[in-house]
Amino acid sequence: VEQALLPAGAPASGLPEAERRLLSAALAAAVKEVFPGAVRGSCGTMEHGFFHDFLLERPFDTGGLACVESAMRRILAAAPAKAVRLSAGEALRRLTDEPLLRDEVEAGGWADETLVRIGAVELVVNGAPSAVLPEGRVFRLTGVSGAYWRGDEKQRMLTRVSGLAFASQADGEAHERRVAEARKRDHRVLGRDLGLFVISERVGRGLPMLAPRGAAIRQALERFIVDEEAARGYEVVYTPVLGRRELYETSGHLAHYGEAMFPAIRLDDQELILRPMTCPHHFMLYRSLPHSWREMPVRYAEISPLYRRERSGELYGLARVLAFHLADSHIMCRPDQVAAELDGVLDLVRHVMTTLGLQDDCSYRASLREPGSPAYEGPADLWDRAEAALLAALARRGLPHREAAGEAAFYGPKIDVQMKTAGGREETLFTIQVDFVLPERFELEYVDSGGRAARPVVIHRSSVGCLERTIAFLLEKYAGALPPWLAPVQVRLLPVGEACEPYARELLAALRARRLRAEVDARAETLGRRIRDARRQLVPYVAVVGPREVASRAISVRNRDTGGEHALAADGFVEGLLREVDGRFLQAAI
Ligand SMILES: [Zn+2]
């Protein structure tokens, strides 16, 4: 998970593979010197580093890492490494003291068995290392951690020693700066420092709780999207988070998606499942009434609580959780309406992206089926139609996109809006699916103009995505300084002494009456300290309320984004901030 914070698209400052292999071999030689009897486990190299696992008789102590690192430097400086190619049989004969690696070679995991003489040892490795580390290269060991043999929690725990390596000192420094920047934007750190959410071991892993400030962000997002959808002809529905097992047998979720679902709960004669998706509920609502071709499309929207089983190692702050809320919708439409509906959805998605200021961080991906794979439901001709409809919609709007075979949902292809996060990861922010398959399985119908029963097409779509993840992305994108309309606290009022507090409270009431989020900090701290705290909390407007402001019924505000400070009439400030919030400005502008 830590690795996820490292930028993926970093400039090509990584060492050639052979040099990283040399570092890995030198590390093994050094560990064998410092820890006699050490047994080698897996090793590997990443763009900027290398690691090697060991089974040790005694654990690393505080000086251990430095000791191993200096042994590595001595070994590398002493003499070039010598490498000879081995046959698999020879490699196995030479691995009698390395039972873990023997297993690996026997399992056929290696392609290039090589004998390396380095330092005082001979090592059998996979892939030839370079003989020397060229001038100017820099490396250091970064830490020791536990790693299961073969990454399997049921296997024994080994000690992993990791290091970083760069082509030059300057590359190393640039990398450190990028890591520090990514850490500063880490939404888990911001969430704690800004008091937004809490993950409690007693509540459960992967079950974050939004504190009042985090909840304020979610509410702002929800109000925005619910109003926007209403204006675009969506109808809000509310459906329960549980559904019968049979519902997911019909939908195919159990067969294709079962591993990501919570186990069923037995209740009397029913088996209930915490839903992983909203579709079946919306379909049953749709089916409860007859629909005429004239009243199509039907657009149901819901901020849906959903549940997905994630492996505990994959849980990650607000971005990967067990319980979350998706701004979900299902559009049931006639086949002749698919194009117009897709245009409408793409327009909504673009509006959401620009409103959140994410348009430059996002790209479109057409996620299609993998031809010939059994992972998909329904006949090929329906899939052809669905894929053609999505690609045509992208083409009509001239949206640049890439195609990804094998990324479709089991019931239909998707347009995914992919976001590059601050940490360099690529994540799906929003998704749009065309589905000819589930309408068949749920026998959805409308009455066509000739009075006959006809099958609608379903468009599944999210708009602001999964609220928890969207909040995580926004925090990382803005490094916590959210646009004023999303900021948990928009104004913090700092009265100078008790005499000014009543006026500060009056301003607070006036702001709150207009549904602006404000608070008074009247703690017995110095003004300087309270200003610093407000800045650290990234509050867009900090207002000092002193005798002058009281006398003139004014307000002096400092703007977080411009750094500007000025005094204005209290009413004028309230109206200005309202304009900014209603207009969803990306930066504080007063
Ligand atoms: Zn759906």
Image (cartoon, rainbow, N blue to C red):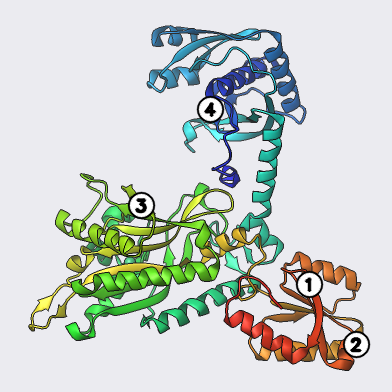
- Against 433, residue 580 (above or below) is below
Whether the residues at callouts 1 and 4 have beta carbons within 8 Å, the answer is no
Question: Is residue 305 visible from the viewing direction of this image?
Answer: no
Query: Counting other residues with Cα less than 10 Å from the Cα at mark 4, is it few (<14), some (14-19), or many (20 or more)?
Result: some
Query: Counting other residues with Cα less than 10 Å from the Cα at mark 1, is it few (<14), some (14-19), or many (20 or more)?
Result: few
Residue 391 appears at what percent x and percent y?
29, 58
Residue 227 appears at what percent x and percent y?
47, 82
Residue under label 1: 564
For mark 2, give the secondary structure: helix
Quarter in which the N terminus is drawn: top right
- Upstream in the sequence, badge 2 or badge 4? 4
Residue 306 appears at what percent x and percent y?
42, 66
Quarter of the image for residue 139 reads top right
Residue under label 3: 259
CB of residue at label 4: within 8 Å of ligand 1? no
Q: Amino acid at mark 4?
A: Gly
- Against 444, residue 359 (above or below) is above
- Please give the label number shown on residue 548: 2
For mark 1, give the secondary structure: loop
- Upstream in the sequence, badge 1 or badge 4? 4
Q: Amino acid at mark 1?
A: Gly
Question: What separation in Å lies between label 1 and label 4 (alpha carbons)?
Answer: 51 Å
Question: What separation in Å lies between label 3 and label 2 (alpha carbons)?
Answer: 65 Å
